[in-house]
Structure formats: C-alpha cells, structure tokens
C-alpha cells in the first residue's frame, strides 16, 4: 500500500486545490511544498 501525500494550493482567488500524490511523485511534492510556503 502506497503512502499518499496531500497538500493544498490556494489559487484562482478563493478556490482551494488539493493535490494528492504517492511517494513516486517527488517533483509534484516539491511544487506543493513551495506553494505551501507562500501561503
């Protein structure tokens, strides 16, 4: 069973997008962490 990492990205005004990825999606994880650091 793979671990899922979920992160939130606040974009398009008040719309909140959620990204859920597995451990193999490290590139997307870095993008999510970068967006989370801005909020």
Image (cartoon, rainbow, N blue to C red):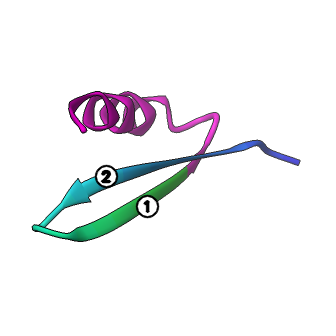
Q: Determine whether 30 is above or below 35 in the image.
A: above
At 12% from the left and 67% from the top, the residue drawn is 12
**Relative to 33, 13 lies left or right:** left
Name which quarter of the figure residue 17 lies in: bottom left
Q: Residue 15: where, in percent of width, then height?
A: 24, 72
Q: In the rendered structure, does residue 30 fall within the stretch colored magenta?
A: yes
Residue, disc 2: 9
> Looking at the image, which is closer to me, 27 or 10?
10
At 21% from the left and 32% from the top, the residue drawn is 38
Q: Callout 2: 10 Å neighbours few (<14), some, many (20+)?
A: some
Name which quarter of the figure residue 27 lies in: top left
Q: Residue 19: where, in percent of width, then height?
A: 45, 56
At 64% from the left and 34% from the top, the residue drawn is 23
**Relative to 16, 12 lies left or right:** left
Q: Callout 1: 10 Å neighbours few (<14), some, many (20+)?
A: few
Q: How many marks do you count on the picture?
A: 2
Residue, disc 1: 18
**Relative to 13, 33 lies left or right:** right
Secondary structure, mark 1, is strand
Q: In the rendered structure, does residue 1 fall within the stretch colored magenta?
A: no
Secondary structure, mark 2, is strand
**Relative to 16, 5 lies left or right:** right
Q: Which residues are magenta?
A: 21-39
Q: Residue 36: where, in percent of width, then height?
A: 33, 36
Circles 1 and 2: CB atoms closer than 8 Å: yes
Give the alpha-carbon distance from disc 1 to disc 2, as whole Å.
6 Å
Name the N-terminal-most of marks 1 and 2: 2
Q: Residue 18: where, in percent of width, then height?
A: 43, 61
Q: The C terminus appears in which quarter of the rendering?
A: top left
């Amino acid at each position: 069973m793979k671990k899922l990492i979920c992160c939130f990205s606040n974009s398009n005004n008040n719309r909140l997008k959620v990204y859920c990825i597995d451990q193999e999606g490290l590139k997307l994880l870095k993008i999510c962490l970068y967006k989370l650091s801005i909020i």
